[in-house]
Amino acid sequence: LGVRIQPVTDDIAESLGMATAKGALVAGVIKGGPVDNGSVQAGDVIIKFDGKDIHEMRDLPRVVAESPVGKAVDVVIVRKGVEQTVKVTLGRLEDGEKLASGENGNPDQDKGDKAAPPVSTASVLGMTVGELNDQTRQKFGIAADVSGVVVTDVAKDSAAAERGIQPGEVITEIAQESVGTPKDVMDRIGALKEQGRKNALLMLASKTGELRFVTIRMD
């Protein structure tokens, strides 16, 4: 299918407005894969594939493997709280699913040496975040095509640390809305708190651009 997937936890389901935790969360789309045309996007939750319910993440690779290459199938996804059906033509088996890091996984990140913070920073949820500029890209070795707000420090024993977030990771979205500045991050978290949300869903990019989702409690 050409996607990287991770489990839909109760916290993620709540953050996505889903009544129950089910399906497989798309953490990334593999370039050149069957759904690289935008039919399936990072942040979508696949809940049905070719008429078969996807109750949990591990169901998807099995169901996909049972389908013949080249077959056009209906895939039911939840995108920003709305169910929709997309048509997907299956690729080769070796183009299939790759598991994303789990919610508590620690991607291989170079923490680097402490350096002067970028011009614009903010502290939120146990993280210090800053602008993604030439200085921070060089410090953390972040690829040129990664965009968002860089995490420059994580407080020990904080909610962010509990989720394995590390300096050098980049916040690209919060609650499925793009962020580009530290102010965006503060505003988005503030809005979620005003809505009475308990958790914030973050899309994080590694320095090479690999995506994963984590939820952080906001109490």
Image (spheres, rainbow, N blue to C red):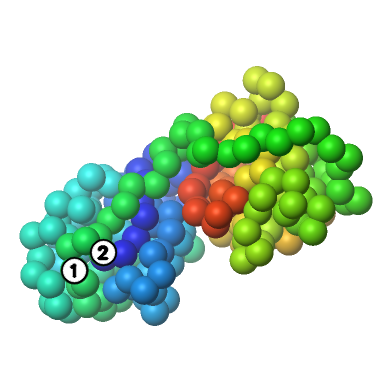
The residue lying at 63 percent from left, 45 percent from top is: 169
Q: In the image, is 148 to the left or to the right of 212?
A: right
User: Could you say which is closer to the camera, residue 30 or residue 26?
Assistant: 30
Across and down, in percent, residue 39 comes to 37, 75
Q: Regarding mark 2 in the picture, which secondary structure is present there?
A: helix
> Which residue is found at the position 36% from the left and 55% from the top?
4
| Label of residue 95 in the image | 2
Q: Amino acid at mark 2?
A: Asp
Is residue 26 shown left or right of residue 68? right
Which three-letter amino acid code belongs to the residue tagged 1? Arg
Residue 36 shows up from this direction? yes
Tell me the residue that label 1 is attached to: 92
Helix, strand or loop status at disc 1: loop
> Where 55 falls versus 52 (above or below)?
above
Q: Is residue 191 visible?
A: no
- The answer to which of 144 and 160 lies nearer the viewer is 144
Task: For marks 1 and 2, give the CA distance.
Answer: 5 Å
Q: Residue 1: image x %, image y %?
A: 26, 65
Q: Residues within 10 Å of mark 1 (few under 14, many from 20)?
A: some
Residue at 13%, 77% (x, y): give it: 71
